[in-house]
Amino acid sequence: MGVGSKERADYGRLYSDSPLSKSSESLPNDEPDKSLLHGFLKSPTRSKSWAKLGFIALTVINTTLLVATLVMLNYSRRGECRAYTEQECAAKTSLYSPLLEPDSGAIEYEHVMFQGALEHKSIYKGTPNKDLDEAWAYITHMNNSVVTGDVLDRIGKSRIAVKYTEEQEPGGKYFVGIEVFHHLHCLNLLRMYTYRDYYDRPENRPAEFTDSEVILRKHVDHCIDMLRQALICHGDAGIVTYYWVKEYGLYPDFSTQHKCRRLDNIIDWADRHHSTAGDPAEGPDTVWLSQPPE
């Protein structure tokens, strides 16, 4: 055998023993093409997984944005009242009254320490006398205030209510009172009722005590219930603490801090809207009711 044939034989054996040759021979006819493209083809399973992850991520992002928006909106709304004046906040927490109008000047708040001690001396309590009666007369302030018909519309009252004649008050002005003064009037009536021996004397007798005993008793009961409703309505949420006091044991401390509307401002509003015409007179459009309103 020549040299050329030996080299060819050796070359042939090397080719036949090559792993590449063996792997190629073991594949079907169309497999080599697929094996070359294997790294470039996307797996259907992997594609679905990515789509699912993308959907989840988008949902999480949208939910986060929604929650963030709601939180910001909530904080924004919480801050609204802080941006208002005290008068505007009072108007938002009360039914309409002309005293709550921004330019009325009737609403101003102040910090007040209630004086709750039994022995505390006050011009408003104790044995009746002239100075005490004058002090109560000032804060009850039962003067004749006037408003327009628009106010009656806004508070849900009929325009058949008592109105001044055009000669008395031009412009169709209605005769009204202010709730706080009625509440103080009622409290004063109860105070006087507890001192009947003093206020039954002719020189001290108030107009309410000139009524019959039946009417006076109804008046007193009316005032008790009006004050009950007012106190429940306003629902003071202040806290009363207690102390151990010798000879008493547990003892409440009713001297507490409060934030109150200044009564002087309300009195000033009533004076500025006071009619100098006296009591209203019957006019051509006066309506008489068959019984008191309920």
Image (cartoon, rainbow, N blue to C red):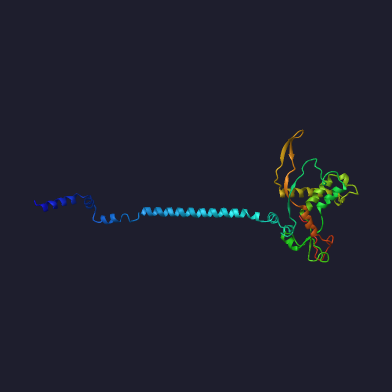
Decide if residue 289 is in sight here. Answer: no
Q: Position of residue 132 (x, y in %)?
A: 85, 47
Q: Identify which residue, 165 or 264, lies in the foreground.
A: 264
Of residues 103 and 212, the one nearer the viewer is 103
Give residue 83's position: percent from left, percent from top.
Answer: 65, 56
Q: Nearer the viewer, residue 30 or 201?
A: 30
Residue 96 place in picture, x, y as percent: 71, 57
Whether residue 269 sits left or right of residue 6 in the image: it is right
Kindly indicate the quadrant of the structure image that contains residue 127.
top right
Q: Residue furthest left?
A: 1
Instruction: Report whether residue 7 is seen.
Output: yes
Looking at the image, residue 231 lies above or below residue 40: above
Residue 126 lies, in percent from the top left, at 84, 43
Q: Residue at x 51, y 53 (%)?
A: 64
Q: Residue at x 13, y 52 (%)?
A: 7
Question: Which residue in the rendered view is the most extreme toward the front?
Answer: 3
Residue lying furthest right:
202
How many marks the image carries: the answer is: 0
On the picture, is 39 further left or further right than 206? left
Residue at left offset 28%, top offset 55%: 36
Q: In the picture, which quadrant includes the C terminus?
A: bottom right
Location of residue 253 by image quarter: top right
Q: Image height check: is 64 above or below 239?
A: below
